Image: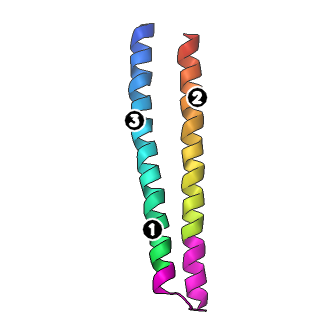
């Protein structure tokens, strides 16, 4: 059986990985924002349904990444609450 210190160390290591994942999510959101701006500039004035669909898809991807980030924040809070109770 692992000691409390070992469990806390393992949770801390996992939380470090979550932090790295959160940074990757933020970077992905920034890249999607840049892609949306580039797409808007390249296709300015187009009334094509495909252009609207592309914009909507990128917006949906950004929303899902935001939700993912929120889920990781909840996971961190829960893990920290657990280790605080040890």
User: x, y percentage for residue 66?
Assistant: 57, 52
**Label 2 crowd bin: few (<14), some (14–19), many (20+), radius 10 Å:** few
Left or right position of 3 against 64: left
Question: What is the spatial separation of the Cα atoms under label 1 and label 3, in whole angstroms?
Answer: 26 Å
Assess whether residue 22 is covered by the magenta stretch: no
In what element is the residue under mark 3?
helix
**Mark 3, residue position:** 17
**Label 1 crowd bin: few (<14), some (14–19), many (20+), radius 10 Å:** few
Left or right position of 39 against 56: left
User: x, y percentage for residue 7?
Assistant: 43, 15
In what element is the residue under mark 2?
helix
> In which image quadrant can residue 6 be found?
top left
70 relative to 84, above or below:
below
Residue 35 seen in the figure:
yes
**Mark 2, residue position:** 77
**Majority secondary structure in the magenta region:** helix
Residue 1 seen in the figure:
no
Question: What is the spatial separation of the Cα atoms under label 3 and label 2, in whole angstroms?
Answer: 14 Å
Going 57% across and 76% down the picture, which residue do you hit?
Answer: 55
In what element is the residue under mark 1?
helix
> In which image quadrant can residue 82 be found?
top right
Question: What is the spatial separation of the Cα atoms under label 1 and label 2, in whole angstroms?
Answer: 31 Å
78 relative to 32, above or below:
above
**Mark 1, residue position:** 34
């Amino acid at each position: 059986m692992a000691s409390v210190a070992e469990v806390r160390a393992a949770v801390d290591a996992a939380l470090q990985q979550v932090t790295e994942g959160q940074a990757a999510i933020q970077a992905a959101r920034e890249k999607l924002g840049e892609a949306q701006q580039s797409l808007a500039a390249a296709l300015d004035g187009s009334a094509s349904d495909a252009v609207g669909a592309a914009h909507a898809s990128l917006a949906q991807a950004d929303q899902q990444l935001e939700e993912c980030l929120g889920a990781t924040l909840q996971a961190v809070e829960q893990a920290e609450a657990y280790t605080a109770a040890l």
